[in-house]
Image: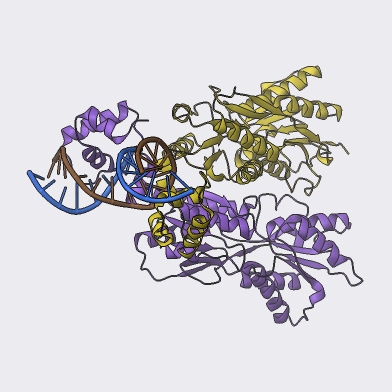
Chain colours: A purple, B yellow, C blue, D brown
Amino acid sequence: MATISDVAARAGVSPATVSRVLNGKSTVDPGLAERVVAAARELDYRPNAFARNLRRQASTVLALIIADVENPFFTAIARGVEDVAQASGYSVVLCNADDDPAKERRYVDVALAERAAGVIISPAGVQTDVGALLEQSIPVVAVDRPLAAPAGDTVLVDTRLAARQATLHLVEAGYHRIACVTGPSGVRTADDRLAGYRDGLRAAKRRSSAALVRRADYRAAGAQRATRDLFDRPERPDALLVANNAMAIGALQALAELGLRPGTEVGVVSFDDAPWAPLVVPSLTVVSQPAYEMGMVAAQLLLARIADGSREPTTTTLSAQLIERDSSRRG
Amino acid sequence: MATISDVAARAGVSPATVSRVLNGKSTVDPGLAERVVAAARELDYRPNAFARNLRRQASTVLALIIADVENPFFTAIARGVEDVAQASGYSVVLCNADDDPAKERRYVDVALAERAAGVIISPAGVQTDVGALLEQSIPVVAVDRPLAAPAGDTVLVDTRLAARQATLHLVEAGYHRIACVTGPSGVRTADDRLAGYRDGLRAAKRRSSAALVRRADYRAAGAQRATRDLFDRPERPDALLVANNAMAIGALQALAELGLRPGTEVGVVSFDDAPWAPLVVPSLTVVSQPAYEMGMVAAQLLLARIADGSREPTTTTLSAQLIERDSSRRG
DNA sequence: GTGAAAGCGCTAACAG
DNA sequence: CTGTTAGCGCTTTCAC
């Protein structure tokens, strides 16, 4: 593989000049520059990123550590991050923490070893520790969920308010025993959505009851069990607030098994819109989160902080939107 | 950030010894080794991947370039790749080519600059050029779709046969005018599925007609237009073979707009199972591809080739499975 | 079994 | 404006 010295030799200049031309830093004689460019092309020269990064003590890749690649919510975030990063000459590497703190830690280590220019993360839980990154002054932006020890920018959705509104929507639609299937304790979105659900019940002067709340792992299978469990008792709920899109699938499966028709018999509202949500019958009412936009904002904040590490940490809260479809309409 | 020399100084040994201990290469005195490990921990030492890779002329990350992060088929492949890679100490960086040859090329360049240990790619089209990778002897495995100039291992699904079977299934279910919505010309899976569809019609002694074939971009919106177009003519089809899961959403939307009920009025079979496929009404009949397994196999082949570059290139063809649900049953 | 020394490919001071 | 030089942090001969 051709090195910078090969190019220099061929163009009859010094390696330093080649570097200058190729990086467009200081200005070089147009004639020389042309020779350098020609030589580089002829040799199919590609700068060695290791050497460059080692020397510069910096790289141009951003690490994006997400909780679950198979969840469209997170992949939409990824698209947002990518589009912004690409436009600024950064590349993005996607790391799938799979909601597993151990995997997440491994990827934080990779980001560290590879000296990522910055990291965007949706923390898997309370133990997420980005201290090591910050010590190396690698900027970190938290997206979807805040870090326990906030350090850096944060991009969130006002998910508690959204859960409250969704719950009130179910109340107004005429449902009486509204249950909630949320995510793991310690995951902020899961706790917030539960809190918002309780807010909603309180606002409607309904009593909330632990018997109507279940925690699952933010995956379909767990939500399916949780839903079965909820309906496996004398006083059945007549509506369900489900805390994410993967769990909605599990919940709908459970209702189908139980022979319960969403809408008419059991009101259902889920977090996260999905391409299939309008297609199920009855179509699914959802709380739509601006995932793509969250990714864009997170990337913009990260780039700003890479450029200027001394900026004050900010928290951006975007709002969600209830999309009413048929699963929350009786009859 | 602590360097290897810092650790060496602290342990009272030479950097070379630290390197030996940390890499478990040649054997060192247990006493020294212990001191080194202690010093490394105390300083929270993390090897600099740039320096290491520069010296070794090799990295331990695999690049996985997929056509569409938002398509569950590809994310399932990613999971398979990741699980195998992790187990062997490699990390995987996911690159979303977004079915865009330009983006794909950019990521190939990144893989090159970062000297990835190997690359797994689902080529976006015919122009995909991995020659530069191979010149640098970076092994390449093609997954889902073959490379135009095959060089390296390939992991495919016998998608033509599967399309044939799916078509015959529709014939046997009593549908008469079976249409096909496939992906872009030049994308092998799209062409193969179309060919398999024609095989099926031929086997059933049905005439195939260009009026019953549409190409779209493997995304929902394109398939929606294609489907509308298909039904926007005097002789309407009464069944649809759809070439992937994203397009199935578009096709089902179009049918809903047209007020056509899948199953009873229009038989539908789509490629790729999805979590929501059993939940739509009627539930969707699909050709299920072993995506996770494809990822695992691809990673295994890649690792084998990294270990031994002289292995003969292989092609592995896995088989798909028809899952009959209600959308291909009349009445 | 251990250390000294060289060098991977690049860029940034510093001279000229 | 251009070349010389040094060094980023690590691994790996080569001596001892």
Q: Is residue A62 left or right of residue A198?
A: left
Q: Is residue B116 left or right of residue B198?
A: left
Q: Residue at 56% of width from left, 44% of height from top?
A: B90
Q: Position of residue A134 (x, y in %)?
A: 45, 65
Q: Is residue A247 left or right of residue B52?
A: right
Q: Residue at 89% of width from left, 72% of height from top?
A: A235
* Image quadrant occupied by the C terminus of chain A: bottom right
**Residue A266 seen from this side:** yes
* Image quadrant occupied by the N terminus of chain A: top left
Q: Position of residue A229 (x, y in %)?
A: 85, 65
**Figure check: A233 above or below B33:** below
- Give whichever of A106, A261 is nearer the camera: A106
* Residue that lies at the very extreme toward the right in this rendered image: A234
- Give whichever of B63, A253 is nearer the camera: B63
**Figure check: B288 above or below A192:** above
- Give whichever of B102, B16 is nearer the camera: B16
Q: Position of residue B301 (x, y in %)?
A: 62, 32
**Figure check: B210 above or below A24:** above
Q: Quadrant of residue A222?
A: bottom right
**Residue A331 seen from this side:** no
Number of callouts: 0
- Give whichever of A227, A330 is nearer the camera: A227
Q: Position of residue B297 (x, y in %)?
A: 66, 35
Q: Quadrant of residue A225?
A: bottom right
